[in-house]
Image: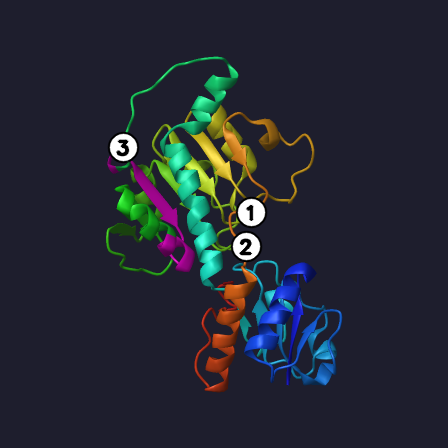
Amino acid sequence: MSFVYKADPARGLIWQRAFAERRPDLPFHLWPETGDPAKVRFLCAWMPPEDIPGTFPNLEILFSVGAGVDQLPLDSLPPGLPVVRMIEDGLTQGMVEYCLAAVLALHRDLPLYRQRQAAGLWQPEPVRLARGRSVGVMGLGVLGQAVLAALRPLGFRLHGWNRSPRAIEGVTVHRRLDDMLPEVEILVCLLPLTEATRGILDARLLARLPPGACLVNTGRGGHLVEADLLAALDSGHLAAAVLDVAEPEPLPPGHPFWTHPRIWLTPHIASMTQPETAVEAVLANLERHARGEALLGLVERGRGY
Ligand code: GLV
């Protein structure tokens, strides 16, 4: 029985060391090295090999090395193969830090003051405090809930929207997205990318936000209709956007997002799987598997996450 890691090789070395220490009984291979392919039971990958049954005939679990599984060809993977998305504390903490930074920057008008600085303008606006500002999160999974929990002590009025209902203390959870949007001045998209959510950040959605609202997208570039965001910013309806994701990545040279004065763009760094904590999460799931218990983060293929 063995484990193969097929993703960033530099981080793979940390996985290898952690496995050697924590599970010396479970041989660990760094792709393209696999040992005897028939012995490979567990694969952790960003992108698995194309022919999984032909490559690893006895594979029992496919772990995504990232939180998202939209990069995986879910429809063409062997039907009975469990697919698990990454849920681990380091990845969650990274997302919390980035979303706090983005929400606070937008809340305190930093894109506006950056523009005024560039224009040599010393021009203050009244200060509004967090308790007078509303933030809404789309997607109330592990990441969305952690972001809301971190925003709460600052006093923001919090809203959330999720496909399946959830109760979260201190958060007004909406069943219908359309009900939440008019309430929200800073909208954070933390949704998984699926057929149902592709293009969800479009003109119709942006128009329902109150004038002067801001957008943070840390989901996937595919959630956003780029032309609709540009139109909403240029009409003045939206004040600013912080985008960590794009489609394609990287954006091509000359793309308007690079230089738009009210778009802050980062290169998909909001959060990254942290090898040390990710290994703990995967090992805990392997133990669950050995005991015949349900895996944490098991993907429902039909819904796409
Ligand atoms: C990053 O985007 C991830 O899916 O972990």
In the displayed structure, would residue 222 be above or below residue 108?
below
Q: CA distance from mark 3 to mark 2?
A: 31 Å
- Label 1 sits on a secondary structure element that is loop
What span is colored magenta in the figure? Answer: 131-146
Q: Which residue is labeled 2 in the image?
A: 272
Mark 3 Cα-neighbour bin, 10 Å: few <14, some 14–19, many ≥20: few
Quarter occupied by the N terminus: bottom right
Q: Which residue is labeled 3 in the image?
A: 129
Q: Which residue is labeled 1 in the image?
A: 269
User: Which residue shows up at 59% across the image and 66% down it?
Assistant: 74
Residue 65 in view, yes or no: yes
**Which image quarter: residue 251?**
top right
User: Which residue shows up at 65% across the image and 65% down it?
Assistant: 12
**Regarding ligand 1, which quadrant of the image does it lie in?**
bottom right
Q: Amino acid at mark 1?
A: Ile
Q: Earlier in the sequence, mark 3 or mark 1?
A: 3
